[in-house]
Amino acid sequence: MVDGFLTTHVLDTARGVPAAGLRITLDRIDGPARERLAEMETNADGRTDGPILSRDRFAPGLYELTFHAGDYLRGSGAPLTSPAFLDEVPVRFGMEAGHYHVPLLLSPFGYSTYRGS
């Protein structure tokens, strides 16, 4: 068995606060197939209450986290264009083993991500 798990942290860099209440989905990608593994929302600290993908469900492979930024930004009262510049922010990445932390730094007109610790 390969040991690993996945976490995230979302920060609203335009307002300087954690992005609370942002919906996140996680899919495993296998060629043309896609399997939904998780759907959750960030807490008051901009994190999920537990790992997005726990050790017992972890498998090496290709994954996609989708951050539903448009819904969050509209709810935050951010000044947005119509349509909003950012809506869903997909981040596709591979996992092999260990702890993967994929944070998102978000504003209405840009974002960045990286493999954190």
Image (tube, rainbow, N blue to C red):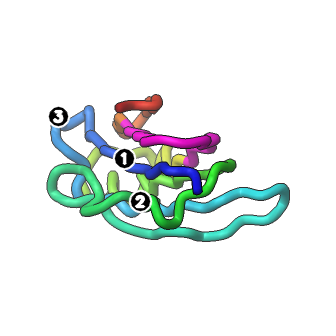
Looking at this view, is 94 or 107 the one in front?
94
Q: Earlier in the sequence, mark 1 or mark 3?
A: 1
Q: Residues within 10 Å of mark 3 (few under 14, many from 20)?
A: few
Q: Are marks 1 and 2 in contact (CB under 8 Å)?
A: yes
Cα distance, mark 3 to mark 2? 24 Å
On the rendered structure, is 9 left or right of 98? left
Whether 64 is drawn above or below 111: the answer is below
To which residue does mark 3 refer? Answer: 16
Is residue 83 at all visible to an observer of this figure? no
Q: Secondary structure at mark 3?
A: loop
Q: For the magenta stretch, what is the residue range?
A: 90-104
Looking at this view, is 1 or 4 the one in front?
1
On the rendered structure, is 58 left or right of 62? left
Q: Secondary structure at mark 1?
A: loop
- 94 drawn magenta: yes
Q: Earlier in the sequence, mark 3 or mark 2?
A: 3
To which residue does mark 1 refer? Answer: 8
Numbered marks: total:
3
Residue at 39% in and 63% down: 23
Q: Earlier in the sequence, mark 1 or mark 2?
A: 1
Residue at 17% in and 50% down: 45
